[in-house]
Each structure stands twice: as structure tokens, then as C-alpha cells.
Image: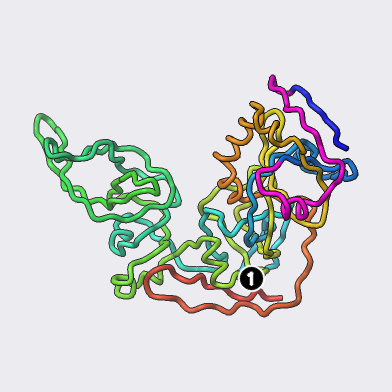
């Protein structure tokens, strides 16, 4: 026996959906049904939470993509002094960071200093580096050609971000002063962003720069290992990230849900997670990431083919196609999650540095 329902929201009519009468867990549903699927929380389950997303779970949901991977559970640190050994204070809900999160971190007890001038970055010529603050530079607006070999650059403020080092660029800048033309030699570090846009950073420009990847040919000779590095969550996990370690987020988006985010995070738990990315199938689509486990129970749509032909389904499916992957990699807030103190597993020793390439994070076992 199936039951049907429909309603009009935000000027668009929901599709008529007929639901199975037999509720199942997501684990059971996904074991025998390929994605995408339309499901709804069974009426025998009532989920309560302090977050707004709790009400979204009770709406019809379009399940889009399964996600398997490691998640890092953290707490915001509001007070810490690792040099004096003061105990840190943690506050707020749990922050969940996927291993694939596209941000850059430093260990709170890493005392290596950042570079402060573009000239110093150019001296080392790393493969990639992080620029932590906006900086004055030049943006390529026209490539050179056979007819006009000169490349045109526009002076503007370059945003903080990760940049790939290309080469050293030298050019003359002409100034007109009292009817005289003065030529000054300008030396710049030529870089590109992840989209291939080229920029010039004058040697004299100052900022805060951390290395990401150095070149083996110059790393040892120029003592690049003594410079400050930043690390991805994946590289820290590969090096043996442990519970109790405190990190600082230097570049990356914080959670969109308010949580008193401080950019300083203490690792509370590391788990292997299995979730599914979904979106509400009514009104403005809202993305959710649901755990695949033994609870709660859902019912699935039995007329899925009809639902797929509705304008609402097309709208929500397009939203998922465009945003699901980025959403799965976001830092998020998880409510009502109790962290259990773990007594198993050895601590992580300080790891040795490697010359050139990606430097290994210097992880230390947290003191009890």
C-alpha cells in the first residue's frame, strides 16, 4: 500500500509522490537501489535538533551521491598557549572537516616563520606557496602575439590564495616627470592561480607567505625547510594526525553555520564515514549530508519515474550536479555529537623533515 501527497511551495508545485509503506534504513535502501533516489523520513521517526536543518530532514529528499572517507571532528579553541603549557579551552558545537577539504593549515606549535617579502619567495622559487593576505601586483589582461609581443598587465590588488611559481619577470616601467621619461627596472615573480590566470608580484611587495611545495634542486641549498609551511588536511592525515593536536586554519572557508568559529581547532575524533549527499525536493533546494547507518528509517518513492519528469525534480537535480561535490568537501557543523575519550592507539611521534617536495607535518603526541 502506498500513500500520495503534493503541495505548492515557492510558486512551484511539488511532484505527486507515492511512498512505500515499508520503512527501511538508508543502509538497506542503498544496498538494493542505485542513486539517484527520492526518499522521505518515516513517520515512525521524529528527529529533534537545535539546528535548522532538522526540519529539512522531514521533507522529501533527493539522494544524489554516496561519500566514503575520513572525517576529522574538531572543537573551536578559545584559549591556548602551547609555549607555557596552559590548558586550552574548547567551546561550541563540533566542526567536521572532510579529509578532502580544500584549505590550508598549520600546527599550533610549529614555530617556523613565514616569508614576508616577494623577493624572499623568489629566492627560494618554490613550486607553490600560499599568500595569506591581499597584495599589490599586476594581472595579465592581454597575452603577447606576433603582431604585438608585449603582454599587458593591469595593476590591482591580488587576492590571498595559492599560487604556482612560473619564473622571474623583468621589465621597464616608464614614468613621465616634468616632460622627461624615466625608465625603472622592475623585477617581479610571475605566478599563476589554479585557473591559469597569470599575475606579477613585484619583489618589493610585502605580505605573509608560506611554502606548500619546494623544489628538490634548491630546497637543501637555500634552507627552504626552515621556512614556514602550510599543509592540506590530507597531507596531515597521511603523516599521522592524532587526537588532541591543535591546528590553525590559515586559508579556507569556515562553516556556513554559525558556531563561534575561531580558526583554531583541536582534533577530538577521526572516523571513517559513509554518508550520502541529498537535497530537499521542495521550495529552494537545501543540501544535506546524511549518515548511512542503522537509524533512522526512510520510505522511498515508488513512482520515481514520474517524479523525474517534474520541473521541481529537474531544478533540484541540476542544483546537485552543480554543487554536490563542493558541498561534500566543505567544513560543516555537527550538532549533538558526543565525543568519546579514546584510550587506544599510540601517540604520533615527531616526524623527520624531507628535503624538497612536500614537507612532512611535524606532528607531536599531545600531552595528557
Q: Answer whether residue 100 is magenta in the image.
A: no
Q: Give the range drawn in magenta.
A: 9-37
Q: Mark 1 points at which residue?
A: 242
| Of 121 and 143, the residue lying toward us | 143
Q: Residue, x 63% and y 56% (percent of image)?
A: 97
Q: In this view, does 3 lie to the left or right of 351?
A: right
Q: Where is residue 281 in the image (x, y as percent from the top left)?
A: 71, 34
Whether residue 361 can be seen here: yes
Whether residue 78 can be seen here: no
Q: Is residue 57 left or right of residue 44?
A: left
| Of 231 and 317, the residue lying toward us | 317
| Of 234 and 243, the residue lying toward us | 234
Q: Which coloring applies here?
A: rainbow
Is the residue 285 above or below the residue 231 in the image?
Answer: above
Q: Answer whether residue 25 is magenta in the image.
A: yes
In the image as oriented, which residue stretches furthest toward the left? 180
Q: Residue 340 is drawn in which quadrant?
A: bottom right
Q: Residue, x 59% and y 36% (percent of image)?
A: 319
Q: Residue 86 is drawn in which quadrant?
A: bottom right
Location of the C terminus (image quadrant): bottom right
Q: Is residue 152 left or right of residue 351?
A: left
In the image as oriented, which residue stretches furthest toward the right? 44
Q: Position of residue 343 (x, y in %)?
A: 76, 76
Q: Position of residue 215 (x, y in %)?
A: 33, 67
Q: Where is residue 256 in the image (x, y as percent from the top left)?
A: 64, 43
Q: Residue, x 40% and y 49% (percent of image)?
A: 194
Amino acid at each position: 500500500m502506498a500513500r500520495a501527497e503534493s503541495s505548492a511551495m515557492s510558486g512551484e508545485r511539488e511532484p505527486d509522490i507515492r511512498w512505500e509503506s515499508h520503512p527501511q534504513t538508508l543502509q538497506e535502501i542503498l544496498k538494493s537501489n542505485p542513486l539517484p533516489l527520492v526518499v522521505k523520513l518515516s513517520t515512525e521517526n521524529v528527529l529533534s535538533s537545535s539546528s535548522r536543518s532538522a526540519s529539512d530532514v522531514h521533507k522529501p529528499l533527493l539522494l544524489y551521491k554516496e561519500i566514503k572517507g575520513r572525517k576529522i571532528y574538531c572543537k573551536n579553541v578559545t584559549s591556548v598557549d602551547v609555549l607555557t603549557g596552559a590548558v586550552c579551552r574548547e567551546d561550541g558545537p563540533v566542526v567536521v572537516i572532510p579529509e578532502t577539504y580544500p584549505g590550508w593549515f598549520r600546527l599550533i606549535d610549529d614555530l617556523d616563520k613565514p616569508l614576508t617579502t616577494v623577493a624572499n619567495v623568489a629566492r627560494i622559487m618554490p613550486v607553490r606557496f600560499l599568500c595569506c593576505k591581499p597584495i599589490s601586483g599586476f594581472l595579465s589582461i592581454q597575452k603577447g602575439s606576433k603582431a604585438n609581443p608585449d603582454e599587458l598587465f593591469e595593476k590591482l590588488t591580488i587576492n590571498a590564495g595559492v599560487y604556482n611559481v612560473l619564473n622571474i619577470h623583468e621589465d621597464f616601467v616608464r614614468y613621465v616627470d616634468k616632460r622627461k621619461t624615466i625608465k625603472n627596472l622592475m623585477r617581479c615573480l610571475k605566478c599563476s592561480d589554479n585557473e591559469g590566470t597569470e599575475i606579477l608580484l613585484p619583489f618589493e611587495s610585502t605580505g605573509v607567505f608560506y611554502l606548500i611545495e619546494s623544489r628538490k634542486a634548491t630546497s637543501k641549498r637555500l634552507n627552504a625547510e626552515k621556512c614556514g609551511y602550510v599543509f592540506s588536511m590530507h597531507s596531515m592525515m597521511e603523516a599521522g594526525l592524532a587526537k588532541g593536536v591543535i591546528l590553525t586554519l590559515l586559508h579556507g572557508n569556515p562553516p556556513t553555520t554559525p558556531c563561534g568559529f575561531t580558526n583554531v581547532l583541536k582534533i577530538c575524533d577521526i572516523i571513517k564515514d559513509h554518508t550520502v549527499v541529498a537535497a530537499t525536493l521542495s521550495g529552494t533546494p537545501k543540501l544535506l549530508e546524511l549518515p548511512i547507518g542503522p537509524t533512522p528509517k526512510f520510505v522511498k518513492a515508488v513512482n520515481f519515474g514520474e517524479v523525474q519528469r517534474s520541473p521541481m525534480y529537474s531544478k533540484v537535480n541540476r542544483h546537485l550536479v552543480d554543487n554536490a561535490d563542493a558541498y561534500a568537501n566543505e567544513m560543516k557543523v555537527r550538532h549533538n555529537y558526543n565525543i568519546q575519550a579514546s584510550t587506544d592507539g599510540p601517540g604520533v611521534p615527531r616526524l623527520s623533515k624531507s628535503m624538497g617536495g612536500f614537507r612532512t607535518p611535524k606532528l607531536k603526541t599531545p600531552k595528557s
